[in-house]
Image: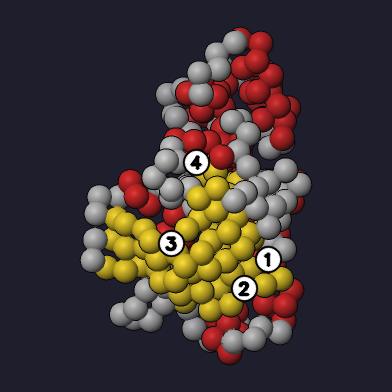
Amino acid sequence: MGAHVEVKALSAWYGTRQALEDITLELEPDTTHAVIGPSGCGKSTFIRCLNRLHEEVPGASVEGRVLLDGEDIYDPATDPVWVRRQVGMVFQRPNPFPTMSIRDNVAAGYRLNGRVHHAALRHVVERSLDRVGLLDEVRDRLDAPASLLSGGQQQRLCIARAIAIEPQVLLMDEPCSALDPAATLRIEDLLRDLRAHYTIVLVTHNMQQAARVAQQTAFLLATDTGPGRLVEAGPTKKIFTTPEDPRTEAYITGRFG
């Protein structure tokens, strides 16, 4: 089961430039949450704040709270490594370790946790590949380099790598933007299956994709000179058919952005 995530008054900076201001949002477990908005509104920054990757950027800073099942991930006593084990991430472009085998790509994070028993590793690798629908496609070449896979297969491999350590939350930053339509549909089908096990946060520019796979949607918007702010959030059907804010309707119908 996924974690319940509460974002409270979250603001983020890159040096002196503020990227996000006062974001408060609740993310329900076992649900796919789409984050939409024009380029530059802070969508990627927002999800990178959910697993403390934002602070890895030199000069970056965060204010506010992010509660993971009630535990503040920004508490000074909270280990960022623990946070990233609970909150996995898949990036815009498939990024498997190209010189490593398919098997070792999936096992990489699990090995970092200090779990190296051979039988356990085999189970984790096969279970993770099976969950993303890749096991039957690669069963006979698990020791082949990951670079030999197609783009869509590489992205599913990256998802398998992310879920191998059994996180509670899965962040996905435009995971289909570099894929062809057929591979995109495979990832969307996978998202529908995975939401029963994780809290999924999906950044996407594709309004049709958000409508197809997300149960909840949050719309972020920034002015030319100001930081990104949350305009509106709620059930996806409501956001797309009867939004409360006219800016949401204007964005969804393509009048700007």
**Most distant residue in the bottom direction:** 246
Question: Alpha carbon of mark 3 to alpha carbon of mark 2: how far?
Answer: 19 Å
Residue at mark 2: 233
Q: Which mark is residue 216?
A: 1
Q: Nearer the viewer, residue 81 or 146?
A: 81
Question: Alpha carbon of mark 2 to alpha carbon of mark 1: how far?
Answer: 7 Å
Do tag 1 and tag 4 residues touch (Cβ < 8 Å)? no
Residue at mark 4: 83
Instruction: Tell me if mark 4 has few (under 14), some (14-19) or many (20+) residues whose alpha carbon lies within 10 angstroms of its own.
Output: some
Question: Alpha carbon of mark 3 to alpha carbon of mark 4: how far?
Answer: 16 Å
Please say if 230 is above or below 184: below
For marks 1 and 3, the one nearer the N-term is 3
The amino acid sitting under disc 3 is Gly
The amino acid sitting under disc 2 is Ala
Please say if 225 is above or below 201: below
> Can I make out residue 66 in this image?
yes
For marks 2 and 1, the one nearer the N-term is 1
The quarter of the displayed image where residue 125 is located? top right
Q: Single out the mark in the foreground, 2 or 4.
A: 4
Question: Alpha carbon of mark 2 to alpha carbon of mark 4: how far?
Answer: 25 Å
The quarter of the displayed image where residue 228 is located? bottom left
Do tag 2 and tag 1 residues touch (Cβ < 8 Å)? yes
Do tag 3 and tag 2 residues touch (Cβ < 8 Å)? no
Point 49% across, 41% down: residue: 83
Q: Which mark is residue 184?
A: none
What element does badge 3 sit on?
strand
